[in-house]
Every structure is written in structure tokens, then in C-alpha cells.
Image (spheres, grey):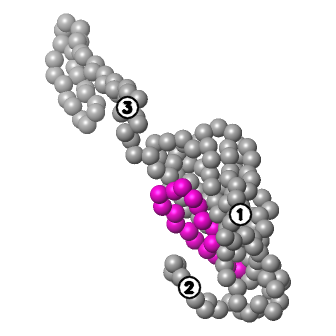
């Protein structure tokens, strides 16, 4: 009998006996106890992508929030927006409801509930707008804040539908790319 091993394949030739004996080793993953599972680090991260469409008298916002959920299941998501923003819709898979939780100090908090606990990844889409008065020469971009996450990164894109120009006067907590 001779054998040749290449990576994960073993080639063998039989002698006159016509019999080959071998062993198969199977490794089973150890089941975690409830205590071991609870010790895992549970975190939620998010990335926010927002397109701002500036038109005549209104700024329309289209935001997508992508959650990454590690070692946990989540059924509620919380988002904050300035009170002068009108939210038209919040959409996500298996979304049960979204509602205003509270509104204080010029900030409105929205609570989003899904039908079933979600793990790994979840995406929310929001559509909202802010009125721009004609006499306003400056416009502050309302910031969408994702609550209850370990880290949130965000990206903004601007498009201009009206006959005007965009000049950035002041940029805080952000950088141009």
C-alpha cells in the first residue's frame, strides 16, 4: 500500500488484499452555555447615507441608515432629527410602526419598531424635508442622529435643482471628500 497526500486529498493504492482501512475524524463545535453567550460583546454600529436635494423653497432629504448588529438581536431603533423637519416616511423590512417618542429642546425623537428581532444587519430609509424661506441666505443642514449605537459614520450628498449656487460657509464635525 502506498499513499500520497496533497493539501486535503489523499491518494492510495491497494495491494493484493483489496482492503483499505481508514479513519474519519469529525470535530464538533462545542455548544455555548447561556453564560458564555452573554459574555460576548454586543454592539450596534451604523452608517448613514443622505442625499439632500435643494429646490425652490424646500430641501428634501433621502437618508438610508444601515445598522450592523453584533452578537445581539434588536427590535427597536431610535433616531433624532431637528423639530423643524417634517418626516414623510420611514421604511424598513418587517417594520411594525414608527412614531414620535418625544419632542423637546428643538429635537424630535422617533422610535421605530420591527415585527421580529433582527440580527446581523438592518436597513432603514427615511424621507423628510425642511422648508427654506426665500429671505434666508444661509441654510443649516439638519443632522440625523442615530441613537444607541457604538459608532455612527455618515455621508452627505448635495444636489441643486434651483438656479443657485452652493457655498460652504462653515463645516463642523465633518470633512469634504
Give the mark nearer the N terminus: 3 vs 1.
3
Q: Nearer the viewer, residue 90 or 177?
A: 90
How far apart are labels 2 and 1 at the CA level? 26 Å
Q: Which numbered disc, 2 or 1, marks the residue that appears first in the sequence?
A: 1
Mark 1 crowdedness (10 Å alpha carbons): few <14, some 14-19, many ≥20: some
Q: Secondary structure at mark 3?
A: helix
Q: Is 120 on the left-hand or right-hand side of 4?
A: right
| Residue at 19%, 6% in the rendered image | 17
Q: Which residues are magenta?
A: 143-159
| Tag 2 residue | 171
Give the labeled residue for mark 1. 103
Look at the image and tell me whether residue 63 can be seen. no
Question: Rounded to the nearest whole Å, what is the CA distance between mark 3 and mark 1?
Answer: 39 Å
User: Tag 2, which secondary structure?
Assistant: loop
* Res 144 → quadrant: bottom right
Which numbered disc flags the more N-terminal residue, 2 or 3? 3
* Magenta-drawn stretch contains 97: no
Q: Is residue 94 above or below residue 27?
A: below
In front of the other: 19 or 60: 60
Reply yes or no: does residue 151 show up in magenta: yes
- Residue at x-position 23% and y-position 22%: 12
Residue 35: image tag:
3
Amino acid at each position: 500500500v502506498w499513499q500520497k497526500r496533497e493539501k486535503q486529498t489523499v491518494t492510495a493504492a491497494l495491494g493484493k488484499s483489496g482492503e483499505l482501512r481508514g479513519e474519519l475524524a469529525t470535530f464538533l463545535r462545542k455548544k455555548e452555555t447561556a453564560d458564555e453567550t452573554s459574555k460576548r460583546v454586543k454592539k450596534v454600529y451604523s452608517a448613514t447615507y443622505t442625499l439632500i436635494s435643494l429646490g425652490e423653497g424646500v430641501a428634501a432629504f433621502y437618508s438610508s441608515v444601515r445598522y450592523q448588529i453584533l452578537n445581539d438581536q434588536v427590535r427597536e431603533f431610535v433616531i433624532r432629527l431637528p423639530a423643524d423637519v417634517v418626516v414623510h416616511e420611514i421604511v424598513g423590512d418587517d417594520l411594525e410602526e414608527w412614531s414620535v417618542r418625544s419632542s423637546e429642546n428643538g429635537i424630535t425623537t422617533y422610535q421605530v419598531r420591527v415585527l421580529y428581532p433582527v440580527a446581523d444587519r438592518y436597513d432603514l430609509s427615511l424621507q423628510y424635508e425642511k422648508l427654506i424661506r426665500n429671505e434666508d441666505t444661509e441654510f443649516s443642514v439638519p443632522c440625523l442622529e442615530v441613537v444607541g449605537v457604538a459608532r455612527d459614520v455618515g455621508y452627505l450628498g448635495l444636489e441643486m435643482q434651483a438656479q443657485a449656487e452652493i457655498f460652504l460657509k462653515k463645516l463642523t464635525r465633518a470633512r469634504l471628500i
